[in-house]
Image (cartoon, coloured by chain):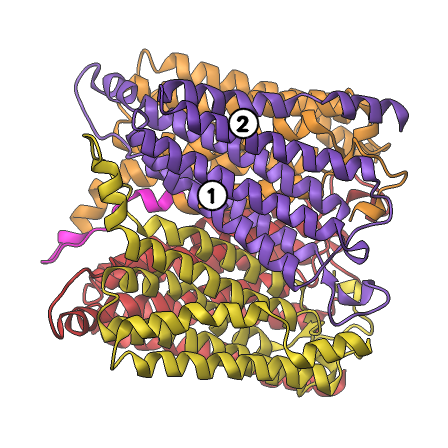
Chain colours: A yellow, B purple, C orange, D red
Amino acid sequence: MSTSASPFSHRHFPASRLETLGDGVFAIAMTVLVLGIQVPDVSGPGALTAHLITLWPKLASYALSFVMLGVLWIGHYYQFQYIRRADRGLIWLNLFFLLAVTFLPFGAGVLGNSYQDWVAVLLYGGTILAAGTALLLHWAHATARPELVISELTPVVEARLRGRIIAGLACSAVAMAIGAVDTRISLGVFLAMPFVYMRRTRAERELARAS
Amino acid sequence: MSTSASPFSHRHFPASRLETLGDGVFAIAMTVLVLGIQVPDVSGPGALTAHLITLWPKLASYALSFVMLGVLWIGHYYQFQYIRRADRGLIWLNLFFLLAVTFLPFGAGVLGNSYQDWVAVLLYGGTILAAGTALLLHWAHATARPELVISELTPVVEARLRGRIIAGLACSAVAMAIGAVDTRISLGVFLAMPFVYMRRTRAERELARAS
Amino acid sequence: MSTSASPFSHRHFPASRLETLGDGVFAIAMTVLVLGIQVPDVSGPGALTAHLITLWPKLASYALSFVMLGVLWIGHYYQFQYIRRADRGLIWLNLFFLLAVTFLPFGAGVLGNSYQDWVAVLLYGGTILAAGTALLLHWAHATARPELVISELTPVVEARLRGRIIAGLACSAVAMAIGAVDTRISLGVFLAMPFVYMRRTRAERELARAS
Amino acid sequence: MSTSASPFSHRHFPASRLETLGDGVFAIAMTVLVLGIQVPDVSGPGALTAHLITLWPKLASYALSFVMLGVLWIGHYYQFQYIRRADRGLIWLNLFFLLAVTFLPFGAGVLGNSYQDWVAVLLYGGTILAAGTALLLHWAHATARPELVISELTPVVEARLRGRIIAGLACSAVAMAIGAVDTRISLGVFLAMPFVYMRRTRAERELARAS
């Protein structure tokens, strides 16, 4: 691994293990989300169906949180297409990002239990905000240091990735604030966020046409 | 990683991290299956044996689900022998596939508790169906875009992988329907599915002879 | 990944993802072992110490099982130094090996709760036996197919790895049988096994001198 | 993998899978920390906030332990920038290091429940000490064998990595001893440790200037 980096440096290391650790944390966070839902153990006609229906807020929180983790993972994945080396600062920003990611299953559990409570929405949205902020600082740290990124990274791409994170932070802040009025609207905003991320932005389409 | 892709593109990324994330999710889903089974804490002569025997539906559901995850993992593994790059659509189809995979431990728990209930069979089979459908769309998306797959991918291989997924979907649908009559026959069909996948198909044998 | 294999074949795939999945399953099995031990929540002077002391059979079972997983992981790791490609049969033998590995945390939990019960020792030892047998078949399958292994694999190395697995199987069988007399002797034999694996064998030392 | 090592040796294997297993164990240990905190299920105005506030020792133990795992992971990550091959001794030292890592979630749970009990601080600090000692032996084993490390490893770097581990061990020992007086000061020392690791040392800065 280290020998592939040229010239060899004792301050900058290949970024590949940050990706491996990140993929591991995301894979586990995605998978343990469902462990928070107690498996029903009921009998009698219709009892299982009735029980599963009562689980809908937990199941919705699980699906929402999985997709949120997907959005955050894609953000991490995209950044590492351009980041090739890591210094100590980047490693710690990566760890703080992952700290927020590992907290999401707890936030998801609270939301599944108490989705009508604004505090649950604030805790959940706050976790997303913390992860997004860490991702933003991670990107800013890397792009401010040419030795950490590949030469193909253009200012357009740099700004596009930054803009996507900021848009997500703004959406989360709005969703959290709306919770003061009605937490169900908050959840709607959170649910809409991934769909916005799923479609290509205009900037991306222009970039695609140009490349 | 990114530098190995030539020519460099801001729309298409190397597929390797989709494999890493997928392997992580499968590894965890396979391992947490057994965590759903309460470890017995009994004493007295014969008590442990008696208790372990009562756990047989849970143990059977665990073994079945592990093998099902194996079948799905092999499907994912085979596709990525031919997929070399990913676009946003493929990333999301991959995530929806993994969402169904992470739900399987819950479905397996319900099946272990209530295997005689058709609802449990429908929930379990529905999870397999969802995962299979996502895998099918994933393959269709990739193979419709020559820039995402390797040039060695032939139409025969493309059709063979597609056919294997469709056969699995059909089997699962049959198993679910039969549950209306007797859920034990459903489980028999689910149990038989992996054995079908374990042997080489005629098309594969012909291909092997030709290559 | 796939392009690095030359000549390209639709029957044989690079073995690297079997390693990734295996590493994931082992990493998780090793880490969830400790989750089976209930974290004490006591207060009062000496209460925590007293409680921790009562946990010793569980803590011993956790440490023993971690080391057992280490022995099995090393067996897997060593084989894949020589295996470079996988066919369908090898993939399934790998999955059956991992199935036994994922069951070990359950066996470890039972052993921690009921280490004085021969049934617990048989369940635990049976899991080790199943994993070892799958590892033996995995090695036999790979080494019988020259296209799956690297050309540097010599008959001496092939026999040495096979011999190590068979020795482990024999030890486990002895430990299980001794449990009929006294389960504590069984545990002693299990505990001694890793130490045997930790030292280099005479064959290995000779090989080292020759290489 | 194995073919990239030249000349081929039956005693020394590429170190990459030790990194993969390590990344997996760390990723899981980091993610399961939060699973030890019971998700509140309360209702009524202010009940959720009140409950979350009572969880502060558990939440603090989770954050502290995540950062501690980060420090240990960085130590592991840095070593493997210089270690390119593994022998049996290194594999086992790596496993003993990971054994201590997998125990940290248990120690973190005990600390979260009983942070005012010196025994909890001793158990927690002892786990850090065990992991640090294994890391130190791991580094000593590797650097004493030129065939296991890359040629770019200089005595300065070797001593620097060793010094960082020893400093961490000393800090942990001090934190444990202080617990006899007041466990809250112990926790303060543990909390301060990562911040020390986050900043570059003087030796590092000099090295950076020289390189």
Task: Compare residues D49 and C110 and report the one nearer the observer.
Answer: D49
Q: Mark 1 lies on which chain?
A: B
Query: Is residue C45 within the magenta segment?
Result: yes
State the mark number for residue A44. none
Q: Which badge, 1 or 2, comes first in the chain's sequence?
A: 1
The residue segment tinted magenta is: C33-48
Q: Could you say where residue D114 lies in the image, as x and y percent from the top left? A: 20, 62
Q: What is the three-letter code of the residue carrying label 2?
A: Cys
Residue D92 visible: no
What residue did someone put label 1 on? B29
Q: How many labels does the image show?
A: 2
Image height check: is A37 above or below C186?
Answer: below
Between C61 and A74, which is closer to the camera in this rendering? A74
Is residue A123 positioned above or below D207 on the image?
Answer: above
Disc sitting over residue B171 in the figure: 2
Image coordinates for residue D198, horizontal then vertical, percent:
51, 79
SS at mark 1?
helix
- The answer to whether residue D135 is visible is yes
Instruction: Give the dominant element type of the magenta stretch: helix, strand or loop.
Output: loop
Where is residue B107, by image quadrant?
top left
Q: Mark 2 lies on which chain?
A: B
Label 2 SS: helix
Residue placed most toward the observer, D144 or A101: A101
